[in-house]
Amino acid sequence: MQAQEQRYYTPEEYLDLEINSEERHEYINGKIILRTGGTPNHNTVALNLSAALNVALKRQPYEVFITDQRLWIPEKRIHTYPDVMVMAQPIEYSEGRRDTLINPVAIAEVLSKSTKNYDKDEKFAAYRTITSFQEYVLIDQYTLHVEQYCRTDFKKWTFLEYDLEDDTLEFASVPFQVGLTDLYDKVDFATEESAEP
């Protein structure tokens, strides 16, 4: 991720710029950060997960969003675009907006080399400030590996890890499970290893 400029912006200035931008940017406490494009594996994994979630949660009080849906984290002053989000109905919006959500139950991020550390550390810490947030799933696009964090109590999380083809990822926050072979369907580890700097 690259910084657009050194100056600081208000959330309102960011939103005004973002609405008219052809590219997507994140907003982190005054800084505007350009989102880089993803790899085919990144896109495939996110699509596989969101499609399976969408089917599993059909006619249930949840909605699934992918990639271009903006999330506002007020306590950390962050606007971001998670790879996959599950929201409980009714959907809650940022004050005065109809294009920015605030109440995710579960978030999944497909890890990239350039954002892996941020997704695991600062971004997860920011997500944990959201009261509705119950589950975080980190999916490696370069090898068969998934990490899952589930809230069990106030400031208490459990950690599960999946790295076998016959493993099944089961969400704790919503009625959903997916086998790793389905999650990684059509992912080509050999071509992606050298695709991203």
Image (tube, helix red, strand yellow):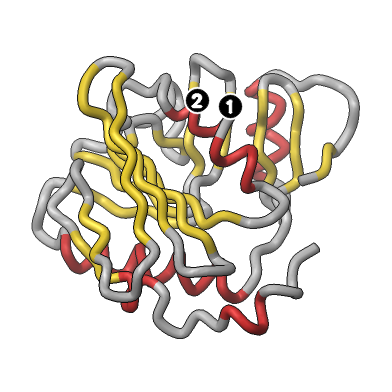
- Using residue 159 as the reference point, say whether residue 16 is left or right of it: right
Query: Which residue, as the protein is rendered here, is positioned at the far front?
Result: 164
Label drawn at residue 78: 1
State whether residue 134 appears in this view.
no
Residue 193 at what x, y percent from top left? Answer: 69, 73
Q: Residues within 10 Å of mark 2 (few under 14, many from 20)?
A: few
Query: Which residue, as the protein is rendered here, is positioned at the far left?
Result: 59
Query: Residue 152 or 93: which is nearer the viewer?
Result: 152
Helix, strand or loop under label 1: strand
Q: Locate residue 154: give its quadrant.
A: top left
Identity of the amino acid at label 2? Answer: Ala
Residue found 35% across the figure and 58% down from its top: 162
Residue found 20% across the figure and 61% down from its top: 177
Identity of the amino acid at label 1? Answer: Ile
Query: Which residue, as the protein is rendered here, is positioned at the far right?
Result: 6
> Compared to 134, does 12 lie above or below?
above
According to the picture, the residue beneath numbered tag 2 turns out to be 125
Disc 2/disc 1 C-alpha distance (Å): 12 Å
Residue 21 at what x, y percent from top left? Answer: 72, 49
- Using residue 126 as the reference point, say whether residue 19 is left or right of it: right
Residue found 85% across the figure and 38% down from its top: 4
Total numbered badges shown on the rendered structure: 2
Label drawn at residue 53: none
Q: Locate residue 146: give its quadrant.
A: bottom left
Query: Residue 76 or 65: which is nearer the viewer?
Result: 76
Residue 102 at what x, y percent from top left? Answer: 39, 30
Helix, strand or loop under label 2: helix
Query: Residue 26 or 109: which is nearer the viewer?
Result: 109
Q: Which quarter of the figure is the C terminus placed in?
A: bottom right
> Compared to 82, does 12 lie above or below?
above
